[in-house]
Image: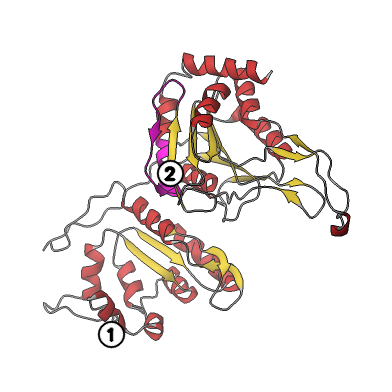
């Protein structure tokens, strides 16, 4: 525990709750006279700091070993995962942002805080990330690393594994979030998409060495600064951006929740409540089908991944995968607990035309993103699109016509 942590929660209270005595002093010795935080540093497979305050970020960024946690981090080669939590203005302050970026440069993983109610009573981006997101970051930190025995007398030095760079040289285009089809300058038709799934895919692709273009509608999560960000509030704008980018893409992942309908006309000024409202809707263009048609004209077509949010049966998703000619379709039941819009978890079924469905268990969206990229790598490793995929694309083109 840091000094600040002990001011909020007594060490004795934490010991009573956990049945373990917390370390509080960087000079503490074990009964065998070894330095406690050095033993902890040597035996760690991963170090998680949650929550991390603005003060702690500043101390760690500058190597000030004035508490047991900074001292342990400085003495360890284990991966470090940090989940900041503080007032929104504090997290947005240039000093804090600089400290966060400095810690990233050390190779530390930052689990960005969320937008929501804060302890101060205000609303801002500083709320501790959801548990599932934090645990997913720990999972990623542990991937490919041997777990050492904590009671071993002699422990080999930790050698941090190099991050996978199997997408280096690839251009991955991802769509994320929901579109907002205007009724008037104030109101719109939209959906509950948070953009979490698409953003997780973009972040995972960046971590594996890809150049990423993230074409996004409305999203409620922080977006990766390393990606090329293209804001497309409406379906028409998203279609234009996708079709102008697909020619130079190796992979297109259509994770956005595009509105299926839009008002035929949008009022130029705010409509009065007293006047009532009657909407005449028209369908938006099918961006996924248009992308498949465009890809058919290319000498080297990208791998195209579609998403289908359904409720109940996934039968329509299977028909969609075959009709639209995608290489792979990710389907989920958004009515299922833990698998809907805005959640940190997802339970998806992978549909490849002509192959048995592959149902994945409930997992974090971060884990879904990593596993999906593994499948995309497998698809790309095959010598071009399969004959069946080409035939499906032809079928989708004819159906669209």
| In magenta stretch: residue 361 | yes
Q: Residue at x 19, y 56 (%)?
A: 148
Q: Is residue 23 visible?
A: no
Residue 27 figure quarter: bottom left
Q: Position of residue 304 (x, y in %)?
A: 54, 29
Mark 1 closeness class: few <14, some 14–19, many ≥20 residues within 10 Å: some
Mark 2 closeness class: few <14, some 14–19, many ≥20 residues within 10 Å: many
Q: Is residue 171 visible?
A: yes
Q: Which residues are magenta?
A: 352-374
Q: How is the image coloured?
A: secondary structure
Callout 2: SS: loop
Tell me if label 2 and label 1 are in contact, CB under 8 Å: no
Q: Is residue 280 shown above or below 119?
A: above
| In magenta stretch: residue 39 | no
Q: Residue at x 22, y 53 (%)?
A: 147
Query: What residue is shown with label 2?
Result: 347
Q: If the image is split into quadrants, where does the C terminus sit?
A: top right
Q: Residue at x 58, y 70 (%)?
A: 88
Q: Is residue 358 shown above or below 110?
A: above
Q: Is residue 175 left or right of residue 14?
A: right
Callout 1: SS: helix
Q: Disc 2 to disc 1, how far (Cα)?
A: 41 Å
Q: Position of residue 31 (x, y in %)?
A: 12, 79
Query: What residue is shown with label 1?
Result: 12
Q: Position of residue 223 (x, y in %)?
A: 57, 52
Q: Is residue 190 left or right of residue 155?
A: right
> Which circle, 2 or 1, is nearer the viewer?
2
Q: Position of residue 91 (x, y in %)?
A: 56, 69
N-terminal of the pair, mark 2 or mark 1, is: 1
Q: Residue at x 64, y 18 (%)?
A: 399
């Amino acid at each position: 525990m840091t000094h600040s942590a002990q001011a909020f929660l007594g060490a004795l209270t934490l010991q009573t709750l956990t049945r373990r005595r917390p370390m509080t002093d960087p000079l503490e010795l074990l009964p065998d006279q070894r330095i406690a935080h050095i033993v902890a540093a040597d035996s760690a497979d991963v170090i998680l700091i949650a929550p991390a305050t603005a003060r702690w970020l500043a101390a760690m960024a500058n190597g000030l070993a004035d508490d047991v946690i900074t001292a342990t981090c400085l003495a360890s080669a284990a991966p470090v995962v940090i989940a900041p939590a503080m007032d929104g203005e504090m997290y947005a302050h240039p000093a804090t942002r600089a400290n966060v970026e400095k810690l990233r440069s050390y190779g530390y993983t930052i689990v960005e805080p969320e937008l929501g109610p804060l302890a101060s009573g205000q609303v801002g981006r500083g709320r501790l990330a959801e548990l599932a997101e934090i645990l997913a970051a720990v999972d990623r930190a542990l991937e490919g690393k041997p777990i050492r025995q904590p009671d071993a007398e002699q422990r080999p030095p930790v050698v941090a594994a190099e991050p996978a760079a199997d997408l280096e040289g690839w251009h991955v285009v991802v769509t994320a979030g929901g579109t907002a089809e205007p009724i008037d300058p104030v109101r719109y038709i939209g959906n509950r998409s948070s953009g979490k799934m698409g953003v997780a895919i973009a972040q995972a692709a960046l971590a594996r060495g890809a150049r990423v273009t993230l074409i996004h509608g409305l999203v409620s999560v922080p977006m990766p600064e390393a990606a090329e960000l293209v804001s497309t509030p409406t379906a028409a704008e998203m279609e234009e951006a996708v079709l102008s980018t697909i020619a130079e893409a190796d992979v297109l992942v259509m994770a956005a929740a595009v509105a299926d309908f839009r008002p035929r006309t949008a009022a130029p000024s705010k409509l009065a409540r007293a006047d009532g409202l009657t909407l005449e809707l028209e369908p938006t263009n099918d961006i996924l089908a248009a992308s498949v048609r465009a890809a058919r004209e290319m000498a080297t077509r990208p791998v195209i991944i579609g998403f289908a949010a359904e409720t109940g049966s996934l039968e329509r998703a299977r028909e969609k995968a075959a009709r639209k000619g995608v290489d792979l379709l990710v389907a989920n039941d958004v009515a299922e607990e833990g698998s809907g819009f805005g959640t940190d978890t997802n339970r998806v079924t992978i549909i490849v035309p002509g192959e048995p469905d592959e149902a994945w268990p409930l997992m974090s969206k971060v884990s879904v993103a990593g596993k999906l990229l593994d499948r995309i790598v497998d698809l790309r490793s095959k010598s071009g699109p399969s004959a069946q995929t080409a035939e499906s694309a032809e079928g989708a083109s004819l159906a669209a016509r």
